[in-house]
Image (cartoon, grey):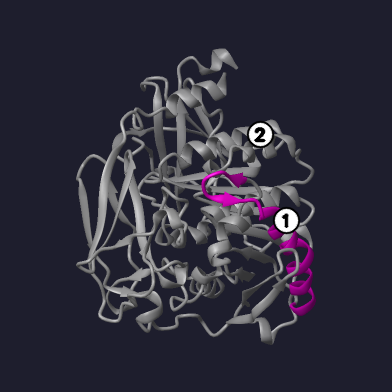
């Protein structure tokens, strides 16, 4: 019944009537290579930068165009067949995703200012980032890949061992010169954390395989977009890359100190790898996951029982179509497989988009929650202090949230804010404090989806809450 209620809550009337829209590039940079094709990549084709079905037509007037059919809002960018050749802004700066809505206009016109590989961007990686190999061999896939390594600033001067996070789409993690959609600034963020709190971790970044990206990041095949090589890619991480990293660097190799993280399709393969190899990984960062790519991911979660204690951090943006609902469904599936509420956290950000800028700003809180124990964080009032998921959720009225370390008197001077799913303020909620638990009462509010924003003096938390007046009677 819970699944039925959630499904009903997320049903949309969009999709009843498709519309067509012509997308046209009428201006290109002076050094544009006319002999190469131009493609459109977006959320409608799983961001495939070289999909033949989405290659633009070169017209006689030296414009490019393509006509798409669909419903609702779309996000997209132009490429020349790979993310290394994505469009850029002036001075080779990152561009936000282009957006348009089917039915609102018949033609979308655009100008490409620069191409990433032809604009001479600047390197931005910090000195403690290095390229381990440009041609690291993947025996499970018979391919080579560039591997990046971030080491804590003190690494060379110490004999310490460190936790490790394995991250995907390595082109976007450290160096703007190589990024195809903007840099996460992992190195700058961790260097800042080290200087502030002494937090430290090794990051291993694995470049995506370009045209192989979708295939490698899903163990399941989508009949439209591909996939199916994800299990071999996961085996590469576990059987080849991790043993090599542990042999070269002073790592803490135990599962308690090993995490995996990614966004979009990278989140899908992070989830799969972490759940399948619970004896290897204990922490999974799941940013804007592409669970829509294959319903088999839910079957996999249901049929893979919990064997170890885990920490799973889900992130969803309010501007990402359906991602929040997919995360809730997956968390519900995992709960039935044995994972507890304390092991899972869903953070929703009303203005969050399926974009690198969003994942960049959310890396720090995710890292702090996932690695709070294994990086030696002290339980004082200066840290981020993430709290548990809301429970029960959905709820008919009362909802609770637990702190990992209690709530200080200073924290509870602030009231929580109840907001709509789009982030609009509704009401200030009083709450009752009892030891490490806060209690909120939503009985007076209509059924629906809300954001509960906890704005404490030391931190800020946001949680999605589902209010349904008949839910508790059906449990």
| 127 shown above or below 227 | below
Give residue 397's position: percent from left, percent from top: 47, 21
Point 21% across, 42% down: residue:
104
- Which secondary structure, mark 2? helix
User: What distance separates the C-alpha of mark 1 from that of mark 2?
Assistant: 18 Å
User: Residue 147 has which mark?
Assistant: none
Q: Which quarter of the figure is the C terminus placed in?
A: top right
The residue nearer to you, when weighing 400 against 462, is 462
Q: Residue at x 29, y 52 (%)?
A: 99
Q: Where is residue 158 shown, x and y percent of the image?
A: 71, 83
Ranked by sequence position, the earlier of labels 1 and 2 is 1
228 relative to 381 in the view: left or right: right
Q: Residues within 10 Å of mark 1 (few under 14, many from 20)?
A: many
Count of numbered circles in the view: 2
**Residue at point 60%, 58% (across, down):** 261
Which stretch is magenta?
A: 221-249
Q: Which secondary structure class fits the magenta region best? A: helix
Of 80 and 95, which appears nearest the observer?
A: 80
User: Could you tell me which secondary element the residue under label 1 belongs to?
Assistant: loop
Which quadrant: the N terminus?
Answer: top right
The question of residue 330 being in magenta is answered with no
Residue 83, x across and y down, in percent: 45, 67
From the image, tell me which residue sits under label 1.
Answer: 281
């Amino acid at each position: 019944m819970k699944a039925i209620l959630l499904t009903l809550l997320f049903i949309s009337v969009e999709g009843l009537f498709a519309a067509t829209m012509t997308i046209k590039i009428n201006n290109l940079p002076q050094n544009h290579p006319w002999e190469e094709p131009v493609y459109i990549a977006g959320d409608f084709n799983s961001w495939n930068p070289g999909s033949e079905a989405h290659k633009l037509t070169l017209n006689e007037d030296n414009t490019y165009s393509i006509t798409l059919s669909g419903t609702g809002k779309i996000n997209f960018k132009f490429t020349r067949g790979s993310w290394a050749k994505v469009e850029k802004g002036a001075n080779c700066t990152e561009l936000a995703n282009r957006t348009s809505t089917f039915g609102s206009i018949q033609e979308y016109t655009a100008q490409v200012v620069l191409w990433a590989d032809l604009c001479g961007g600047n390197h931005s990686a910090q000195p403690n980032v290095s390229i381990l190999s440009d041609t690291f061999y993947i025996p499970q896939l018979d391919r080579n890949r560039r591997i990046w390594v971030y080491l804590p600033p003190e690494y060379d001067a110490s004999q310490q061992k460190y936790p490790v996070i394995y991250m995907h789409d390595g082109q976007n993690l450290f160096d703007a010169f190589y990024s195809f959609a903007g840099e996460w600034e992992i190195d700058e963020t961790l260097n800042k954390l080290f200087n502030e709190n002494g937090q430290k971790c090794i990051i291993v970044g694995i470049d995506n395989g370009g045209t192989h990206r979708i295939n490698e990041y899903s163990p399941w095949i989508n009949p439209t977009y591909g996939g199916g090589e994800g299990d071999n890619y996961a085996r590469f991480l576990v059987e080849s890359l991790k043993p090599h990293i542990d042999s070269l660097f002073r790592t803490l190799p135990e599962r308690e100190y090993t995490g995996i993280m990614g966004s979009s399709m990278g989140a899908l393969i992070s989830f799969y790898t972490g759940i399948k190899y619970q004896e290897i990984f204990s922490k999974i960062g799941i940013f804007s996951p592409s669970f829509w790519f294959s319903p088999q991911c839910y079957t996999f979660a249901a049929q893979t029982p919990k064997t170890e204690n885990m920490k799973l951090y889900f992130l969803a943006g309010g501007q990402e179509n359906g991602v929040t609902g997919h995360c809730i469904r997956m968390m519900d599936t995992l709960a039935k497989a044995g994972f507890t509420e304390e092991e899972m956290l869903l953070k929703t950000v009303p203005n969050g988009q399926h974009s690198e800028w969003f994942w960049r700003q959310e890396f720090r809180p995710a890292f702090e929650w996932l690695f709070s124990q294994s990086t030696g964080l002290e339980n004082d009032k200066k840290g981020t202090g993430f709290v548990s998921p809301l429970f029960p959720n959905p709820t008919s009225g009362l909802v609770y949230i637990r702190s990992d370390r209690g709530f200080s008197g200073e924290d509870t001077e602030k009231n929580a804010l109840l907001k709509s799913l789009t982030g609009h303020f509704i009401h200030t909620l009083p709450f009752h404090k009892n030891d490490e638990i806060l209690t909120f009462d939503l009985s007076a509010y209509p059924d629906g989806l809300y954001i509960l924003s906890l704005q404490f003096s030391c931190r800020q938390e946001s949680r999605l809450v589902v209010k349904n007046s008949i839910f508790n009677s059906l449990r």
